[in-house]
Image (spheres, helix red, strand yellow):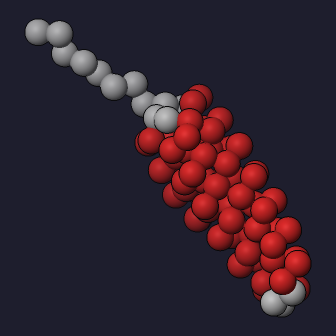
Amino acid sequence: MLWAVGGWAAQRTSNALGGAIVLGLVGLVSSVVFIGLAYGAVQEMLLFGGAGGLAYGALGGMLIATALAEVKETNSD
């Protein structure tokens, strides 16, 4: 559910950098939580897993924000 909300928020930013930040943070948090549950508080595992989740989320956020950007309608009246 966290990734679904993060994807929605990344799509709403309509900006590749904003999407990368939003989904990157989601990836970081979710990977640290799951690695903490699986391996305990092993610092190296938390760091590597957090870095992997951050990178995965940031790339996904850039793609989602760019591909699914909402078109801002302008009225030229």
Residue 38 in view of the camera: no
- The C terminus lies in quadrant: top left
Identity of the residue drawn at 64% across and 55% down: 24
Residue 23 position, x and y percent, is 60, 53
Q: Residue at x 67, y 48 (%)?
A: 58
Q: Quadrant of residue 31?
A: bottom right
Residue 74 rendering spot, x and y as whole percentages:
24, 18
Q: Nearer the viewer, residue 48 or 75?
A: 48
Asked whether the viewer can see residue 75, the reply is: yes
In the displayed orientation, state which residue is furthest to the left: 77
Instruction: Name which residue lies at 55% across and 40% down.
Output: 17
- Residue 37, relative to residue 17: is it above or below? below
**Residue 51 appears left or right of 15:** right
Assign the N terminus to one quadrant of the image.
bottom right
Q: Image height check: is 71 above or below 29?
A: above
Closer to us: 61 or 43: 43
Callout count: 0
Q: Which residue is located at x 81 percent, y 72 percent? A: 47
- Expressed as whole percent of the image width and height from the top left, the position of residue 4 reads 57, 56
Q: Is residue 15 above or below residue 7?
A: above
